[in-house]
Image (cartoon, rainbow, N blue to C red):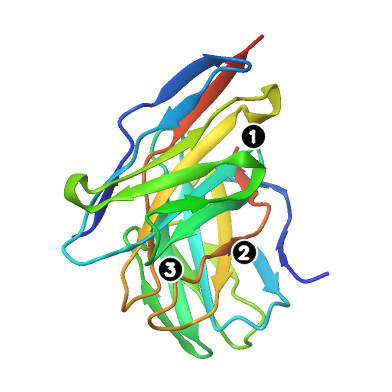
Amino acid sequence: DGGITQSPKYLFRKEGQNVTLSCEQNLNHDAMYWYRQDPGQGLRLIYYSQIVNDFQKGDIAEGYSVSREKKESFPLTVTSAQKNPTAFYLCASSIHSIGIATEAFFGQGTRLTVV
Amino acid sequence: AQSVTQPDIHITVSEGASLELRCNYSYGATPYLFWYVQSPGQGLQLLLKYFSGDTLVQGIKGFEAEFKRSQSSFNLRKPSVHWSDAAEYFCAVRREYGNKLVFGAGTILRVKS
């Protein structure tokens, strides 16, 4: 089945550690996104990529890094510089197109907790 | 900058009652508009989308939404709510010449029996 797979579902991090969240899609989508979700704040865009080897900062990129070496994969690293990383992280993908109302398809999310 | 406002943080309706969730957007040109639903601890599922044509859009699970340009609104409706509709609902907007989705803060729907 086509879709977006995020792993792990739950992740615990000690303060000062970097952690990497995995996101893989087999939808052949060009564009991929990372969102952070906190209660009452909706989804905020961290990074997005419209093509392999290219990505742009979203609204809250500080303390995060990404790579896009393959079309199918868009891992997110939460670095020690992120002061409040405990949140629910959602990965999404979409067809990169202009003039078409393409929706984003979402993974099931990773809940990151700092302990 | 684009923004999406969902004025209601929580809404409680009785099972079988009608539902309307409000969404207002701020964007100069005609945006692409979406409604998503999220169950606790899960990803988002698309309910419906609008980009042109008929301003009343039908979606999955019996939901519909109406685009009103004069009010910059895209409200979600359902004539009869089921207990399984309890979830969080997000309105989102995308620019015509961009790929980024901007989300509202969400509305949590509770259904009482």
Q: Which residue is drawn at 52% across and 66% down?
A: A103
N-terminal of the two: label 2 or label 3?
2
Residue A104 point in image, percent of width and height = 53, 65
Q: Which of B39 and B111 is in front in this view?
A: B111
Residue A20: image tag: 2
In the picture of the structure, the residue carrying the numbered disc 1 is B40
Chain letter behind tag 2: A
Q: What element carries label 1?
A: loop
Front-most of residues A38 and A19: A38
A69 vs A19: above or below: below
Q: Distance between the residues labelled 1 and 2?
A: 23 Å
Dot 3 crowding, Cα within 10 Å, few <14, some 14–19, many 20+: many
Q: Is residue A15 above or below residue A62?
A: above
- The answer to whether residue A18 of the structure is visible from this angle is no
Q: Mark 1 lies on which chain?
A: B
To which chain does the residue with label 3 belong? A
Q: Which amino acid does label 1 sit on?
A: Pro
Q: Which residue type carries mark 3?
A: Tyr
Rendered residue at 31%/69% (across/down): B95
Residue under numbered circle 3: A47
Residue A91 position within the rendered picture, expressed as x and y whole percent measured from the top left: 58, 62
